[in-house]
Amino acid sequence: MKKILLIMLVFLTSTLCAGDLNLWKNSTLNKIVQRGELRVGLDPGYMPFEMKDKKGRLIGYDIDIARIMAREMGVKLKIVPTGFGGIIAGLLTDKFDIIIAGMTITQKRNLKVNFSDSYLVIGQTVLINNKFANEIKDAKQLDDKKYIITAKLGQTGEIVARKFFKNAKINTFDTEVEAVSEVLNGNATAFVNDKPYNSIFMASKGKGRLVHLDKPLTYEPLAFAIKKGDPDFLNWLNNFLKQIKEDKLVDTYDKLYKKWFVNTNWLKRVQ
């Protein structure tokens, strides 16, 4: 009887070890290391996370995070520009290994992908055309059929606009620039987007033309998105985040935040 139990234990242990090896073999992290290249999906045009400078080079907070990530993996970085509306589909069809695109964790998205720990927390705010400054003092007032609200297609701004302003007309666009331009040009009342983007847009182009209702409507943790069923990759990403956040000797996280969200000198480099 003892001999049978021993054989069963050996068999079970061997099976579990083989399963662990197969899990690692199929891990995206292992494939990245073997390939020597980290492929990152993002949507350029989202200040200050990812955008093009005047020479057409990609710069931004997420770009810097991706570069540091690739360096720590010991591999090259490949950016794969992808429209935000199809970015999850791109990940699931293996066009890239990870989404680093200022993506908010939502329960709906979490059904399709797994998220890392949050690397930044933001909220949605509203920019309104200056001609409505005396009429609209609070975002709640926008929930009226006489108002037109714009947002970028597929982003959290669209989700929030449809949730909070059910009586208003919601128009979506492929880019933030198109959506906010409708408000600048007087074709729409308000634009809903992440607070960092709205704050920077106000500083660069909105003065005297827009009003920023800057009280966040939502609590939104941003995170990296990866395919489901990959605990090794998720473990590495969470440890990577903890390291850059907590290592005060190097101070990587705080330096990046100040570079892109406090200091706005980079605006001179952007198209």
Image (cartoon, rainbow, N blue to C red):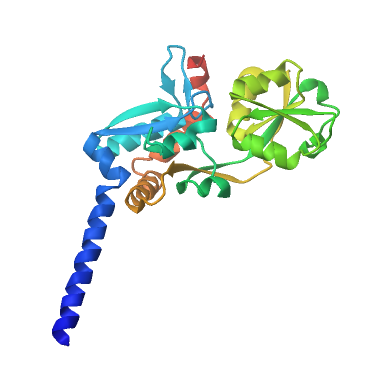
| Placement of 185 over or under 13, stated as above or below | above
Q: Position of residue 152 (x, y in %)?
A: 62, 29
Q: Position of residue 22 (x, y in %)?
A: 25, 53
In this view, the residue farthest toward the bottom is: 1
Quarter holding residue 149: top right
In this view, the residue farthest toward the left is: 3
Is residue 148 found left or right of 13 in the rendered image?
A: right
Q: Position of residue 156 (x, y in %)?
A: 61, 38
Nearest the camera: 220 or 153? 153
Residue at 34 percent across and 35 percent down: it is 68
Q: What is the number of callouts on the image?
A: 0
| Placement of 107 over or under 37, stated as above or below | below
Q: Quadrant of the N terminus?
A: bottom left
Is residue 147 found left or right of 203 in the rendered image?
A: right
Nearest the camera: 244 or 156? 156
Query: Quick check: can you spot residue 261?
Result: no
Residue at 28 percent across and 35 percent down: it is 71
Residue at 28 percent across and 38 percent down: it is 32
Residue at 38 percent across and 40 percent down: it is 251
Q: Position of residue 209 (x, y in %)?
A: 73, 18
Query: Quick check: can you spot residue 186?
Result: yes
Is residue 198 found left or right of 25 in the rendered image?
A: right
Nearest the camera: 78 or 22? 22
